[in-house]
Image (spheres, rainbow, N blue to C red):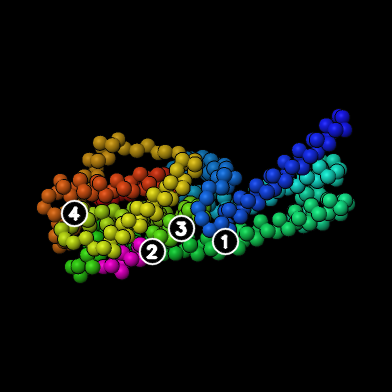
């Protein structure tokens, strides 16, 4: 190979390696340090690759409990795989840079890169430029691991706060949880419109969901400790309860409930827009629209009957109430169904 062409090849290889290292470091910083929701393509590719394997395994399961047990490992495995992929890419990038500065054969450069990245110190035969690259690579290797380890407590604290509300909902809404049962619990003293404290707590929960599940999207895939629970279904239950209150119950609409409903719609829709179709979820078979509406209307009528049995005063025009309920639910239905498919949430077996 002509010397000039060989020199050009070294320059291109070195620049390519530097770009790969900078891109990987940028992905790590944007994943855990940048305080805003941003799609990191490198992380998406890692998550999607691992998700394909788990989706295949879940399809082989013969029950939801088995699928839930399999998918419960997806988020932890994907999270641990991130720094492995980051360090592998950094190692490849530095291998190219070592070769570009003349540190020897590709094999020797790869061994030098691995020794530096993992701070093994098994190779110390390098030039001045090689030494600079070695120390910088060792620093980056430690930095990437530190980023993940320092943010693990943050991730699990957010997960714990989320699951406390999910568990408390089950205690209040029955098993399986229903909007009618939850609304009946809120009416324990005959004043369903005045329980602002509970609705304010749910508003705070939705705000935290919006912030944490877009800035740390892997949180969306951490499953509840119990197979029948899901943060997606819990959010849908709260919104269904508010929609049922507004549409079916005769009386004033509390301001706090309206704020909570708005916060919930914003949270689910923003998480939905963050993932959209980029997360690799395969759509499941849904009921035809007409059949689904018939079931929903039957559920709505059953919920109204249960509310009447609990002593709530209902709107007399049931058709208008149903139309109002459909309009309210339409504000979050698409997001709810998408997130349920994306996270493989348990199916709702409830009336409303």
- Crowd band around label 2 with a 10 angstrom C-alpha radius: few (<14), some (14–19), many (20+): few
Q: List x then y, in percent, for residue 150.
A: 60, 63
- Mark 1 / mark 3, whichever is N-terminal: 1
Residue beneath the point at 79% across and 39% down: 11
How far apart are the two marked residues, 2 and 4, measured between alpha carbons? 25 Å
Residue beneath the point at 49% across and 49% down: 71
Badge 2 vs badge 1, beta-carbon distance below 8 Å: no
Q: Quadrant of residue 165?
A: bottom left
Q: Is residue 197 magenta?
A: yes
Label 4 secondary element:
helix
Is residue 298 visible to us here? no
Question: Mark 1 against mark 3, which lies toward the viewer?
Answer: 3
Label 1 secondary element:
helix
Mark linked to residue 211: 3
- Residue bearing mark 2: 204
- Mark 4 / mark 3, whichever is N-terminal: 3
Relative to 187, 269 lies left or right: right
- Mark 4 / mark 1, whichever is N-terminal: 1
- Mark 2 / mark 1, whichever is N-terminal: 1
Badge 2 vs badge 3, beta-carbon distance below 8 Å: no
Q: Quadrant of the N terminus?
A: top right
Q: Is residue 57 magenta?
A: no
How far apart are the two marked residues, 4 and 1, measured between alpha carbons? 44 Å
Residue beneath the point at 33% across and 66% down: 200
- Crowd band around label 4 with a 10 angstrom C-alpha radius: few (<14), some (14–19), many (20+): many
How far apart are the two marked residues, 4 and 3, measured between alpha carbons? 32 Å
């Amino acid at each position: 190979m002509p010397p000039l062409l060989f020199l050009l090849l070294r320059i291109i290889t070195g620049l390519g390696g530097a770009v790969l290292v900078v891109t990987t470091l940028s992905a790590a910083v944007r994943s855990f340090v940048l305080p805003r929701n941003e799609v990191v393509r490198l992380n998406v590719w890692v998550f999607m690759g691992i998700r394909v394997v788990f989706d295949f395994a879940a399809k082989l399961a013969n029950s939801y409990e088995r699928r839930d047990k399999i998918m419960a490992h997806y988020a932890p495995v994907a999270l641990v795989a991130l720094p492995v992929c980051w360090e592998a890419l950094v190692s490849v990038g530095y291998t190219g840079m070592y070769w570009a500065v003349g540190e020897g054969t590709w094999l020797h450069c790869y061994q030098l890169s691995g020794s530096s990245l993992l701070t093994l110190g098994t190779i110390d035969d390098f030039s001045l430029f090689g030494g600079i690259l070695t120390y910088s690579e060792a620093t980056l290797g430690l930095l990437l691991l530190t980023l993940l380890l320092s943010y693990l407590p943050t991730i699990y604290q957010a997960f714990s706060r989320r699951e406390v509300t999910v568990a408390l909902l089950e205690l209040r809404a029955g098993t399986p949880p229903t909007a009618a049962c939850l609304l009946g619990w809120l009416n324990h003293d005959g004043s369903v419109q005045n329980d602002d404290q509970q609705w304010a707590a749910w508003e705070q929960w939705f705000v935290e969901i919006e912030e944490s599940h877009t800035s740390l999207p892997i949180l969306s895939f951490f499953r509840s400790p119990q197979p029948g629970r899901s943060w997606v279904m819990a959010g849908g239950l709260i919104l269904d309860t508010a929609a049922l209150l507004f549409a079916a119950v005769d009386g004033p609409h509390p301001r706090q409930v309206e704020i909570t409903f708005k916060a919930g719609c914003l949270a689910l829709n923003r998480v939905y827009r963050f993932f959209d179709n980029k997360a690799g979820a395969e759509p499941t078979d849904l009921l035809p629209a007409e059949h689904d509406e018939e079931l929903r209307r039957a559920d709505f009528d059953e919920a109204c009957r249960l509310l009447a049995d609990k002593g709530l005063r209902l709107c007399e025009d049931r058709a208008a109430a149903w139309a109002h309920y459909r309009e309210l639910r339409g504000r979050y239905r698409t997001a709810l169904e998408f997130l349920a498919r994306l996270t493989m949430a348990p199916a709702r077996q409830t009336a409303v």
